[in-house]
Image: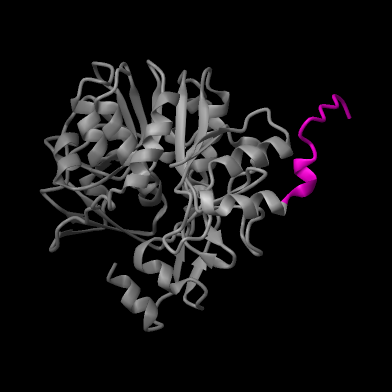
Amino acid sequence: MAYLDEVVEGRMIFRTWHIAGRGRRLAGSDYLEYVPVRARDVAAHLRSRVDVAIVRVTPPDAHGMCSLGPSASYTKAMLMSARLTIAEVDPQLPRTRGSDVSFPYASFDLVVDAETPTSTYVSGHRSEQAAQIAKHLVPLIKQGATLQLGIGSVTEEVASSLVSSDVSDLRIVGMMTDSMVDLAESGRLVHGPNSIEAVELLGTRKVFDFAYENDALQMYSSATIHDSAWLASKPNLISICSALSVDLSGQVASEQIGPRLISGVGGSADFFEGAHQSPGGARVVALTAKTPSGASRICAELAPGTAVTLPRHSIDYVVTEHGAAHLAGLSLGERAEALTAIAAPEHRDALEASLPRRKAEKGSHHVGP
């Protein structure tokens, strides 16, 4: 992200709805403006705000149409509203299927040849913790499920585990990554077109080559992929999202820890709404029990200043390497017990001691107000 050098030098302001990579170093500075917005609302937020849109596209086809390749989220909506549109033409970009990634070559104001390779995303370091989380999570995925998997080592392990599982007739919605290519080629997905409906491709040449004019993969904008009613029409939608921290009531923090911004709202709220309304659907938060420094991600209370990304009533399962806590229908005391049981063993005593009042609920089952 070379433009961040310009930001650091004070020549630009970085305004974003999702902080990642080097951008995190700017968190808390005067040069970064974070906009907390759900994925489905990004396109509407950009409307009438974009002066210049610079996008990478394929060369035009016989009909004069370029493909936006790996990115369908809000790219076309941005082009439709920008005052000036600039295309970088990259012959190596995958020509993907879908009207949301098709744009007329003649409609660009300026066209240049791409001088650098398209950015790729290399999978994170695989770990034993991620493999254990996947082991607890895969049993929640039933025959014929539609999977929404985010990015990261945990979801990569889930996809890899499903390759050798007995589950089949699966569909994928949301993100498409390298690890999901292996799942798609394993025969575990339903046969035929549109078995994968993606908003973004994030990976290496592996996923780009898989996506090239592949009828099994259809690209959709966030207006569709993050629409809860559209998602709810898919039976058995299992939405699996990561998090930074979860408190003992089930509140989930995915954007920041205290005042420190780390990520963004993303599509988790949209996917969880869809999964909640989907017949047989489930909303799953997956995270390691500890941070790299050893602190517990399961905490009595979220750190002061931490934003709640997902409220406690919107979570069905929380999964760590120590097990899966099924929170739906549990009281606050029962939730605290279930979440403590999947925390890192060395932190469990402190968690239990922090909530003596909730522990008193055990054995008392009053019904009613």
Image quadrant assignment for residue 325: top right
Left or right of 100, for residue 334: right
- Residue 159, relative to residue 73: is it above or below? above
- Boundaries of the magenta span: 355-369
Query: What quarter of the picture does the N terminus occupy?
Result: bottom left
The reply to whether residue 324 is visible in this rendering is yes
Q: In terms of depth relative to the viewer, which is nearer, 199 or 181? A: 181
Judge whether residue 220 is colored magenta: no
Say which residue appears at 40% left-offset and 39% top-offset: 133
In the image, is residue 364 part of the stretch drawn in magenta?
A: yes
Q: Position of residue 127 (x, y in %)?
A: 31, 48
The image quarter containing residue 206 is top left
Please name the colour scheme applied to the rendered image: one colour
Seen in the image, is 325 located left or right of residue 53?
A: right
Would residue 98 be seen by someone viewing this image from the given angle? no
Asked if residue 176 is positioned above or below residue 55 in the image, the reply reads above
